[in-house]
Every structure is written in structure tokens, then in C-alpha cells.
Amino acid sequence: MMKCSKLSSFVASWLLPACLLAGSEQAQARIYDDVVDSGFVRIGVYRDFPPYSFERDGEPAGIDVDLGKEIADELGVEMRLHWMTPDETLDDDLRNNVWKGHYLDKDENNPLAMKNVADVMMRVPYDRDYAYKRDSMGLIINDLVVMMSPYHQERWQLTYDSEKLDSVRTLAKFQYHPIGVEVDSLPAFYLTSAMQGRMRDKTHHYTNPRVAFKAMKEGEVSAVMGMRSEIDWLLKRENSSRYRLAENGFPAMGKQVWDIGIAVGEADRDLGYAVESLFDRMIRDGSMEELFAQYGVTYESPSLYITTP
């Protein structure tokens, strides 16, 4: 979605086909034994993407960074961060960071080779239909990566300025009140097209939810819509009862709730299983929820753990 609005763009664009290109320039993914023997594991996290992965006082921080440390401790190795810059689509990010490497990211010692990719890529939208999507020949498109181990369920959330709005029971209110969204995100597309475009003129676009939230504080917009984790984190930092969460849903918006997992190379399934075992234990013993709470983020178990009576 924007250049890529990170996760929000994935939800809108993960149905685009991947380019499965392999060759001599492909970075080498490492299998479980190689990771353990090397003494370190590369954890792929997105740059400048709080509360998931960012720098605080010059040091890496965030939910996914902390989970990367847990993975490294589980394997008995050191964590090394592989900072990822989002591309246009999820397919691009999987190619650049899991199985091939980016064509601009060359190894200084070998100009013909890519630098190393991540051993474990964090915060990958987990969807079985996408993971097993096939091309016109019936071949699995994403056959060089394995998407697995969902550890969180994400959703869209709206926060509003209670000094400007009494409540938000319906999005129809934003025919008359300005709302901020991340440029090219799914909420941006939704608010500019729903209700025959009647909210388009009141939809203001910003580079990320933090900038949109700042605009709300400065009175430019009356509300902000984004991923719940980002909204929760912003509200925790602001620590003011003035800004409140809306309780409404978003009719006809499409995918409103989705699971978040990891991606590993197709040959690295054992590494993925080790992470899956760790995350399962953390979800079941409550430590996953505790980690999210440290960043003020509401934790919701992935759909795999939701049981019906």
C-alpha cells in the first residue's frame, strides 16, 4: 500500500502474486543446525515500526524485538537483528528478507551475492489461503517460504478526541468531521470509497499513525484510524482520558481481523517448529500477553487458540 504501509498494506495487497526468482544471487537461508552452530540467529523486524520494532534511546525496542530475544534464548544463541524496509507487497518482503535478498543489498566481499537474509521474519500476516495460493499452473506460489506460528491477532481500531466528538457509533460521522489515516492503508481506501465517497473530503492522509495522532492533538483531525496495536501504544504514551477508543466495527471493510505469525525459509522448518513451540508455551502460560502489556497493547490470541463452546 503506500511505498508499503507495513502491515496495513499487507492486508490490502497480499493477494498479489509473488515473483519466484532463484539464481546465483540468492542469499543463503540457514537451517536449524547451522543457526545453533553459528551462535546467533537473525531476526527480521521492520524499521521504525513501534510498538513492534523501533529504536528507543539508541537501542532496539519493541514487541518483536523482545520476542526475538526470547527466540535466541530458547535456541541458546545471540540475537542479531535484520532490519527490514517494507517494499510494495508482502510477496516482495518475503522475497527480500526470507529467501532471496534485495538486489540493492549486496555483500561487500562478493559483489555478485546478496547479503544474508533473516532466519526468522517477524510480523507476517498469517492466512492459509494466501500461504497455499497457487498459480495458473496449479503450483504453490510461495513455495520457498513457510508462514507459520501465529502469535497475535490484529484488528483495526479508531480513537477519537472526546473534546471534538461525544462518541463514534457510526463512521457516517466522518462525513462532517475530519479523520486521519496512514496513506495508502486499508482504512485510507475504505474511508475514501465507502458511502459513495461521502467521507473522502474529510479523510486526511499521513505518513504513519504517529503523525496522524499528532495531527489530532493539534486539532487538524477529530479521530485517527489504524491498527489496534499502534493505537493502543499511542494512547499509552499520551496517557490522557481525552483520547478514547471507539467501539464500533467497520461494515463492508473487508478483512478486519487477522492473525500475525512468522516466516522462515522452506528448508528451515525445524527452526520454525522451535519458534512455534516457544510461542505456544508463551501464549498458554500468559507470558505473551504480559509482554504485549508492557507496551500498553491489548493482546488477543490468534484464531488457532479461540475455542467455541
Image (spheres, rainbow, N blue to C red):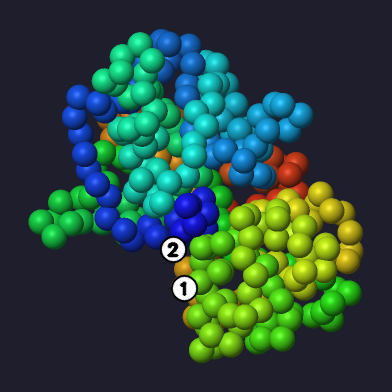
Q: Mark 2: which secondary structure?
A: helix
Residue 48, how many percent across, how many down? 62, 41
Question: Horizontally, is 202 left or right of 234 in the view?
Answer: left
Q: Quadrant of residue 12?
A: bottom left
Task: Tell me the quadrant of the picture where the C terminus can be found.
Answer: bottom right
Q: Mark 1: which secondary structure?
A: loop
Instruction: Check the image and name the residue furthest to the left.
Output: 137
Establish if 299 lies above or below 175: above
Residue 35, how many percent across, how many down? 41, 18
Question: Horizontally, is 275 left or right of 68 in the view?
Answer: left
Q: Nearer the viewer, residue 17 or 68?
A: 17
Report the number of numbered marks.
2
C-alpha separation, residue under disc 1 versus residue under disc 2: 9 Å
Question: Horizontally, is 173 left or right of 121 in the view?
Answer: right
Give the label on residue 12, or none: 2
Q: Is residue 97 visible?
A: yes
Indicate the amino acid at tag 1: Gly
Give the residue pinned by disc 1: 254
Indicate the amino acid at tag 2: Ala
Q: Is residue 300 visible?
A: no
Residue drawn 40% across and 35% down? Answer: 97
Residue drawn 78% across and 65% down? Answer: 216
Q: Quadrant of residue 128?
A: bottom left
